[in-house]
Image (cartoon, rainbow, N blue to C red):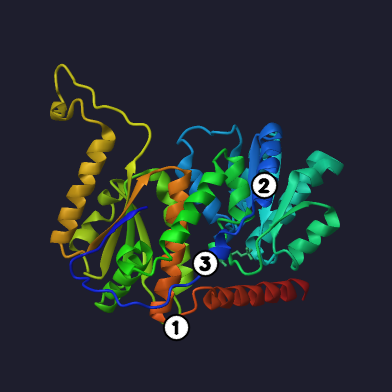
Amino acid sequence: MLRFEYPKNVQQFDMVGLPDMKHYIDCSVEEMLGIQKVANEIQENAEVLLVIGVGGSFLGARAVIDALTPYFRTISGVEVIYAGNNMSGAYLRQLLTYLDGKSVYVNVISKSGSTMEPALAFRVVKQYMENRYGTEAFERILVTTDPEKGILKNIANESGYRQFVIPTDVGGRYSVFTAAGLLPIAVAGIDIDAFLQGARQAEVDTSNENIGQNAAYQYAFARFELYSQGYSLELLASFEPRLKKLHEWWKQLFGESEGKEQKGLYPSTVTFSTDLHAIGQFIQDGSRILFETLLHFDEIEEDIEVPSSFDDLDGLNYLSGRSMNEINATSKDGVVLAHEEGGVPVMKICVPKLDAYHVGYLMFFFMKACVISASLLEVNPFDQPGVEAYKQKMLELLKEDVVKIHE
Ligand code: PA5
């Protein structure tokens, strides 16, 4: 279980209904074993897994992989890299050059099957794979999509690609516990069983109707309460750089679920201590519109001790023998004191350990809190009409361009 601490100016919690979200973690043992089997095959045969997807169709996997694999090497021997999350020609060109000479598998993930960024990237990569692997390319391309419909589903059927499913009732940003997240995570060598178990425990804990013991409910209510007091920006902050993509996932989850009908908190993220030297001034002293949610892991494997120095030229001998993680934790306490003094309400989410079980727990916790938050705001957490508007405009412009070219 994680611990949640909220600021003093949030006094009381009123009950609203708790959503039932069991189906978001409804991966059967059979499905999990099927995913693991293909992951093992990729580990045996590939040096690189290219994940093609955008938004919820890649951020969850990337968040978990970055959080749970070492900074400078892989666990499984397979490097997981990403495409289809931008429209940069330079990125795709350089990606293909990077793939040359390496053994490659591709996992293209799109629930709708028609999102422009992954669809375009897949068109390029599919051709690359066919040129490289000929008739065997289809064995190295795995599709994760809707179980019944969509362009990608049709392409997979036509080409004989192996398929994995994002259930119809699970939207992209809530899909990390489906094959969309689990396959790349398993390929990276992370224990998907432990990851799912953490999520299942979170489901039980966050369904507790005793809201004094329901951290997801308290978090949702506290942020709503602060929003009602005029704090319109939530800053998620951590002290471990490998959590940056987890931040991105959180930002998308809350941003796309809540920001509608001219309502919602603006979700932003910082990694300390790096960002204390970038945005720290604003947090301490700028417009008083933000509150901070500190994400803290009590136990992080691997640490290093500050050595003592004979001449102490840098004057740091007073820290000799202390560990970097310990100093990092102390800097966190200093940040809390300073920011609270500067008028920034600070909440804390404390997770016992940075491992697969607890990351699964945390992500489900956030998903649940997000749906509760949206219901407090009276908005639908599962649609994204604003994103559709941009897609429509882009399509209109692209089609206009085509007409001009042919004139
Ligand atoms: O959360 C969402 O629904 C979105 O962010 C989608 O995941 C994103 O737009 C990609 O959609 P799709 O998986 O249909 O390509």
Disc 1 residue type (three-letter): Glu
Residue 108 in the image, given as x and y percentages of width and height: 68, 53
Asked if disc 3 and disc 2 are in contact, CB closer than 8 Å, the reply is: no
**For this rendering, which residue is in front, 171 or 84?**
171
How far apart in space, not on screen, are marks 3 and 1 (Cα)? 24 Å
Quadrant in the rendering for residue 15: bottom left
Which mark is in front, 1 or 2? 2
**Residue receiving disc 1:** 261
Quadrant for ligand 1 reads bottom right
Q: Quadrant of residue 186?
A: top right
Can residue 365 be seen in this snapshot?
A: yes
Q: Residues within 10 Å of mark 3 (few under 14, many from 20)?
A: some
Q: Earlier in the sequence, mark 3 or mark 2?
A: 3
* Vertical comparison of 252 with 193: above or below: below
Q: Is residue 248 visible?
A: no
Q: Nearer the viewer, mark 3 or mark 1?
A: 3
Total marks shown come to 3
Q: Nearer the viewer, mark 3 or mark 2?
A: 3
CB at disc 1 and ligand 1 closer than 8 Å: no
Mark 3 — residue?
21
Name the amino acid, label 2: Ile
Residue 256, given in percent of the width and then of the height, sits at 48, 70
Q: Position of residue 129 (x, y in %)?
A: 76, 44
Residue at which label 2 appears: 35
